[in-house]
Amino acid sequence: MHLSLVIPCYNEEESLPALFSALDGAVEDLIRRGHTVEVIIVDDGSRDRSAQLLREATTSRPWLQAIRLSRNFGQTAALAAGFSEATGEVIIPLDADMQNDPMDIPLLLSKLEEGFDVVSGWRHRRQDARLTRILPSAVANWLISRVSGVALHDYGCTLKAYRREVLRDVHLYGEMHRFIPIYAAWHGARVTEIPVRHHPRRAGKTKYGLGRVPRVLLDLLWVRFFWFYGTRPLHAFGMFGLLNIGLALLCFLLMVWFKYWGGKTFIQTPLPQLVVTLFGMGCLSILMGFLAEILMRTYHEAAGQPTFVVRERYLNGQAQPAGPLGRR
Ligand code: UDP
Ligand code: MG
């Protein structure tokens, strides 16, 4: 198989020498197993000597390619940059800090060969700070599994293997690289996981702490919304709008009842304000739904994006594969 390893790198000068020698070994091993390999390291606007080390490393390694982004865009964008350059049938992201072990790649590949489209690494003995990293991540993984219906133990592990088709239509924003297996599963891909090794960070510092938690939660909300209502936003906005208008009507009836039978004038209750606010919110929400609907249709029609996914077609009794996630 033709493999692309994609490695995001931000201020990792202390880890890079070890990474290069690990890659030398891993690439040689993969080639011996009959694969062809390219390695794409994306320098995410490092301010240390990473870029220089990368350039030097490419001189003696024909399989290595380095891309330098103009500034720090974040791990997700760095991965997206690497994916867009990758030519492999199988694309394998991993970290530059040597916390993932490139020697696990054959393990991932053997799972792919069993017929899966995505194999997710699971750092079952994760070597990070317990309180600030492992605990929030355990809660997040549980929540993401519940919300997405795709049961994985470790979305955050960078080391995963994707068949090329899976990544074809995936656009990455925010902190969303962890959600690729979810997109893929929703589009019909077969997703599985295997335990992989995880090493403590030996050099340099982690780029993340607790600040990541709210961002991942917001991204999760968005992913859920987009999946359920991406092609029919009016239903989401409209339901919320109708609910508000219904409540406004209820408040209005209560207000009238109080005036004529309950012995309270309009201004003795907060109901008039509620009627106006709820009714206004309801109308606005429905109008926003129309706007969202126009945007959605513009997107699908202008980009020629269908609202469905084809897996196979049958002609003369023969199945014609369109790739695992073929959308043509
Ligand atoms: N990284 C990146 N851009 C960033 C932050 C991180 O490319 O803005 C890279 C980093 O160099 C590393 C990987 O993403 O290769 C994971 O980062 P880190 O090791 O800090 O995260 P952790 O392993 O602690 O979750
Ligand atoms: Mg790390």
Image (cartoon, rainbow, N blue to C red):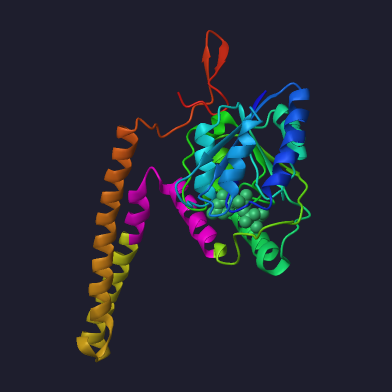
Q: Is residue 101 above or below residue 136?
A: above
Q: Is residue 31 above or below residue 79?
A: above
Residue drawn at x 56%, y 10% as measured from the top left = 317
Q: Is residue 39 magenta?
A: no
Q: Is residue 180 above or below residue 29?
A: below
Closer to us: 207 or 327: 207
Report the magenta residues as a range. 214-240
Relative image position of residue 98 (x, y in whole percent): 71, 48
Q: Is residue 91 visible?
A: no
Q: In terms of image quadrants, where is residue 298?
A: top left
Residue drawn at x 27%, y 81% as measured from the top left = 271
Relative image position of residue 119 (x, y in whole percent): 68, 38
Relative image position of residue 93 (x, y in whole percent): 62, 40
The C terminus: image quadrant? top left
Relative image position of residue 208 (x, y in whole percent): 60, 61
The N terminus: image quadrant? top right
Q: In terms of image quadrants, where is residue 53?
A: top right
Predominant SS along the magenta part: helix
Closer to us: 6 or 238: 6
Residue drawn at x 49%, y 26% as measured from the top left = 310
